Image (tube, helix red, strand yellow):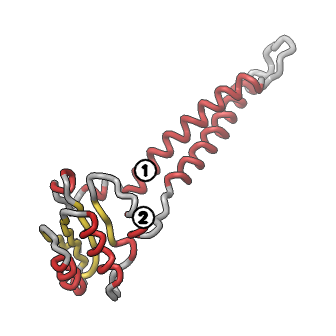
Amino acid sequence: MSTVRILGLFNDFDLASYALREVRDAYLPALNRDDITIKSPIEHPDVEELLGYRPAPIRRYTLIGSLLGGILGFLFLASSQGNFFAQQKGGKPIIPFPPDIVLTYEMLILGGVYITVLGFLISAGLPARMKSELYNTKISEDQIGVLVKSDARTIAEIKKIFEKHLAISITEEVIE
């Protein structure tokens, strides 16, 4: 069975939310909670309530990147300083901690930033997602888009729901 994306454009967020609620409440066996997306030019605080909680893995990437950056940064600094243990230090420690803390902090920030950017690209599905995402330029201006991905059997019912709630335009795209 082929997978189809359908995009309904609405003038008002309330109309889009009513359509979204009806699509979500209709018994469509092939429809998953993560297959519904709202596209809007502005932020709507009710979107999370409508779509439900979706995990944001970016924080984990930031934590892992920061920890790895700090640990590896300190290990690199300490190993490079430890290689010179045969040199005369004049009573100074082989691995001086106060200056290493500053450089370790810098590496912690650098690792966190780099891994966060990488995690964002992975979570967003880039660059693979850029190939064929159903989109309309009116969404960038003033309209609300409701994007639903489902199999071909349920698309007719979703289209009827969109038409019932006064969708301005309905566009389909066959994925597979």
Crowding near the residue tagged with mark 2, few <14, some 14–19, many ≥20 C-alpha atoms within 10 Å: few
Of the numbered discs 1 and 2, the one sitting upstream in the chain is 2
Q: Quadrant of the C terminus?
A: bottom left
- Is 5 or 122 nearer to us in this picture? 5
**Disc 2, SS:** helix
**Of the residues tagged 1 and 2, which is closer to the observer?**
2
Residue 153 visible, this angle: yes
Q: Disc 1 to disc 2, how far (Cα)?
A: 20 Å
Q: Position of residue 109 (x, y in %)?
A: 57, 35
Q: In the figure, residue 110 lies in which quadrant?
A: top right
Left or right of 85? Residue 102 is: left
Residue 120 place in picture, x, y as percent: 43, 50
Instruction: Give the residue drawn at x 16%, y 71%.
Output: 167
Percent x, y for residue 171?
Answer: 14, 69
- Identify which residue, 122 or 154, lies in the foreground: 154
Quadrant in which the N terminus is drawn: bottom left
Please give left or right for residue 12 compared with residue 93 in the image: left
Return the residue at label 1: 120
Q: Residue at x 21, y 72 (%)?
A: 6
Name the residue at the left extreme: 169
Of 124 and 158, nearer the camera is 158
Tell me, yes or no, whether the two marked residues, 1 and 2, touch with CB atoms within 8 Å: no
Q: Please, what is the three-letter code of the amino acid marked with disc 2? A: Glu
- Label 1 is placed on what type of residue? Phe
- What residue would you read off at disc 2? 48
Q: Is residue 162 above or below residue 44?
A: below
Q: Residue at x 23, y 61 (%)?
A: 144
Q: Which mark is residue 83?
A: none
Element carrying mark 1: helix
- Residue 71 is drawn in which quadrant? top right
